[in-house]
Image (spheres, rainbow, N blue to C red):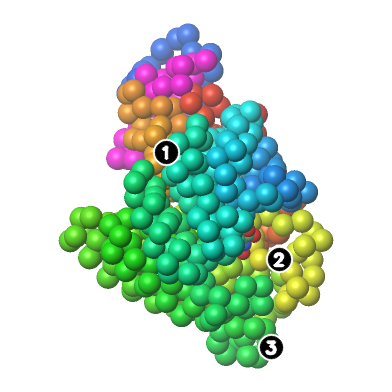
């Protein structure tokens, strides 16, 4: 399979043709009338980025195939411009053994639309007590490097310490869902704690319940000389802690802290909860505008390393309930690039090289995914995406390839659209549609 991509804008702003063959980028430059390609793609006006990498996707297989499967989630990922996703471990059964991790990895290979890298659970059954088979998952063919009890916090500091020590032996990282369950009880805490939660009569989820865990975990990472990744950062206070911690880690050179922010925490605010629409119920909750602004600045200045979707599909019968009874989570894979374009690029906070950094290069490095996040140069694996930076889109939840419809972006006008995606040189999406 060979493809000639004509006239794409590269990250330095220059225009070039890319010739892709047998999974690799073979030539970059002015390739004129090069003949013999199986397919020619006109990329005039489009920006070429390395394929996006999502550090935080819920695929729901095994166990909740009514909400999403590896196939449907991969389809949504491909049209969203992704070439790799990290599949969270809170499935049923939980991904807490090498066998379970291999199952997810193999389902991804069969689908062949994006690379599906399983995230391993930190503790058996996400119960927060006994460590899962971290080493066996790491040594399996699935090569698990990211471990998370996401949906639950590794709340016991002794368990977190042991997990950090363990993953250090093979260069792994613990991705933490930072929620102190004593300050923000699972299941009940559902609205940013403040004037609005009081007025709406919804149980509060104070920012400090996140911040105390972030602060604790960076100290544990420093103490153990290991790596912690903070999932879905949502408050200005967490950003302050991260800014301090990153400066320390850089000085010490012996440990690391990285962080991700979701598209929804970059744009949506807590006042959306006033209508009690469960579509906006998510963990951590939507926050006030001051937090949103701090998150944008932190993403722009590198305090936050990555955008991760936390794509959390839920079946209608779990989501369409009174606010307090509905499931937590919202879709994100198909709209992430448009949200980032609208929030970060249109405002001048990030240029396209910055988008490539936070949506591809940094997440690929954090997850240890070789072959992803690489500069589009001769010899690199041809994992790439073509983006129309000027496209105006109106999100339609019924046009989604996800099996679920809990889409907080429905009806919103956004800028920027994915036109084509390529996984190892094979187009998975062309003209914005799945092949
Ligand atoms: N984000 C959510 O609100 N829900 C996630 C779990 C999680 O990311 O904590 C889910 O699995 O549905
Ligand atoms: Zn989480
Ligand atoms: Zn999640």
| Crowding near the residue tagged with mark 2, few <14, some 14–19, many ≥20 C-alpha atoms within 10 Å | many
User: Label 2 near label 3: C-beta < 8 Å?
Assistant: no
Q: Is residue 11 magenta?
A: yes
Q: Compare residues 197 and 132 and report the one nearer the observer.
A: 132
Q: Which SS class for mark 2?
A: loop
* Segment tinted magenta in the rendering: 1-26
Identity of the residue furthest to the front in this view: 130
Distance CA(mark 3)–CA(mark 2): 18 Å
Q: Nearer the viewer, mark 3 or mark 2?
A: 2
| Crowding near the residue tagged with mark 1, few <14, some 14–19, many ≥20 C-alpha atoms within 10 Å | many
Residue 245, above or below 15: below
Residue 319: x percent and y percent?
75, 64
Residue 124: x percent and y percent?
57, 55
| In-image side of 179 versus 230 (left or right) | right
Q: Which SS class for mark 1?
A: loop
Instruction: Residue 327: give its label.
Output: 2
- Label 2 C-beta lies within 8 Å of the nearest ligand 1 atom: yes
Instruction: Tell me, yes or no, if residue 391 can be seen here.
Output: no
Instruction: Residue 201: give its label.
Output: 3
Residue at image coords 60%, 32%:
106
Q: Compare residues 161 and 4 and report the one nearer the observer.
A: 161
Instruction: Residue 369: give its label.
Output: 1
Distance CA(mark 1)–CA(mark 2): 31 Å
Q: Nearer the viewer, mark 1 or mark 3?
A: 1
Residue 168, above or below 35: below
Label 1 or label 3, whichever comes before in sequence order:
3
Q: Compare residues 90 and 422 and report the one nearer the observer.
A: 90
Q: Quadrant of the C terminus?
A: top right
Q: Is residue 215 magenta?
A: no
Instruction: Residue 292: give its label.
Output: none
């Amino acid at each position: 399979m060979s493809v000639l991509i004509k006239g794409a804008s590269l990250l330095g702003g220059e225009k070039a043709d890319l010739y892709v063959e047998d999974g690799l980028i073979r030539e970059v430059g002015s390739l004129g009338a090069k003949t013999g390609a199986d397919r020619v793609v006109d990329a005039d006006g489009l920006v070429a980025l390395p394929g996006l990498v999502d550090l935080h996707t819920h695929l729901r297989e095994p166990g909740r195939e009514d909400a999403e499967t590896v196939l449907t989630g991969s389809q949504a990922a491909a049209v969203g411009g992704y070439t790799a996703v990290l599949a969270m471990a809170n499935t049923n059964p939980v991904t807490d053994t090498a066998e379970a991790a291999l199952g997810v990895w193999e389902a991804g290979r069969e689908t062949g639309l994006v690379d599906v890298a399983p995230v391993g659970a930190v503790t058996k059954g996400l119960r927060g007590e006994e460590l899962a088979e971290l080493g066996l998952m790491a040594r399996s063919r699935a090569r698990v490097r990211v471990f998370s009890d996401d949906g639950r916090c590794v709340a016991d500091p002794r368990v977190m310490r042991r997990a950090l020590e363990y993953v250090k032996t093979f260069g792994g990282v613990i991705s933490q869902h930072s929620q102190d369950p004593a300050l923000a009880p699972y299941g009940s805490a559902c609205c940013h704690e403040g004037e609005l939660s009081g007025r709406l009569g919804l149980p509060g989820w104070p920012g400090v319940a996140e911040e105390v865990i972030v602060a604790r975990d960076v100290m544990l990472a420093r103490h153990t000389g290991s790596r912690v990744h903070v999932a879905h950062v949502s408050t200005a206070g967490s950003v302050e802690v991260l800014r301090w911690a990153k400066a320390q880690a850089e000085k010490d050179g012996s440990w690391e802290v990285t962080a991700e922010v979701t598209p929804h925490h970059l744009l949506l605010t807590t006042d959306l909860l006033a209508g009690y629409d469960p579509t906006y119920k998510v963990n951590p909750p939507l926050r006030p505008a001051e937090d949103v602004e701090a998150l944008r600045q932190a993403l722009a200045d590198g305090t936050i390393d990555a955008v991760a979707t936390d794509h959390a599909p839920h079946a209608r019968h779990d989501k369409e309930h009174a606010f307090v009874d509905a499931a937590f989570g919202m879709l994100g894979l198909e709209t992430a690039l448009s949200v980032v374009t609208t929030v970060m690029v249109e405002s001048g906070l990030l240029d396209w090289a910055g988008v490539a950094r936070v949506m591809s290069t940094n997440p690929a490095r954090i997850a240890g995914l070789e072959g992803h996040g690489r500069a589009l140069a001769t010899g690199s694996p041809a994992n790439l995406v073509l983006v129309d930076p000027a496209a105006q889109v109106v999100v339609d939840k019924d046009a989604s390839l996800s099996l679920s419809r809990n889409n907080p972006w429905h009806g919103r006008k956004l800028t920027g659209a994915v036109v084509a995606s390529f996984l190892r040189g094979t187009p998975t999406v062309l003209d914005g549609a799945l092949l």
